Image (tube, rainbow, N blue to C red):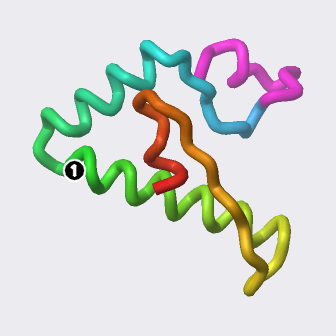
């Protein structure tokens, strides 16, 4: 977590760290290079997390349309 968010007076204290695009790419690359996780597993986790949030917000059993554009960000929709 960034140092500024760790200060007790910060309104963001306790929130997860938000990464830049470059930081996230580096974190994903390091995770894959470690051999502990594959790119496919990271995409599955992203999709499962997105689905969990959608269910929590909109209820179980409802239909949702997920649109993914070109690029390297389709894992959440996958």
- Based on the displayed image, in which of its 4 quarters is residue 41 positioned? bottom left
Q: Which residue is mark 1?
A: 37
Q: Nearer the viewer, residue 61 or 29?
A: 61
- Rendered residue at 39%/59% (across/down): 44
Find out whether residue 39 is within the magenta segment: no
Which quadrant of the figure contains the N terminus? top right
- Rendered residue at 35%/49% (across/down): 42
Q: Position of residue 67 (x, y in %)?
A: 62, 48
Vertical position of residue 27 compared to residue 40: above or below: above
Boundaries of the magenta span = 1-12
In the image: residue 6, left or right of residue 70? right
Q: Nearer the viewer, residue 3 or 64?
A: 64
Mark 1: few/some/many CA within 10 Å (<14, 14-19, 20+): few
- Under circle 1, the secondary element is loop
Vertical position of residue 69 compared to residue 50: above or below: above
- Rendered residue at 77%/70% (across/down): 56
In the image: residue 6, left or right of residue 74? right
Q: Position of residue 31 (x, y in %)?
A: 25, 37
């Amino acid at each position: 977590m960034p140092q500024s968010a760790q200060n007790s007076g910060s309104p963001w204290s306790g929130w997860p760290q938000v990464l830049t695009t470059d930081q996230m790419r580096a974190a994903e690359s390091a995770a894959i290079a470690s051999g502990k996780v594959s790119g496919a597993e990271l995409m599955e986790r992203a999709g499962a997390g997105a689905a969990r949030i959608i269910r929590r917000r909109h209820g179980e059993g409802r239909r949702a349309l997920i649109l993914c554009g070109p690029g390297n960000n389709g894992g959440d929709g996958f």
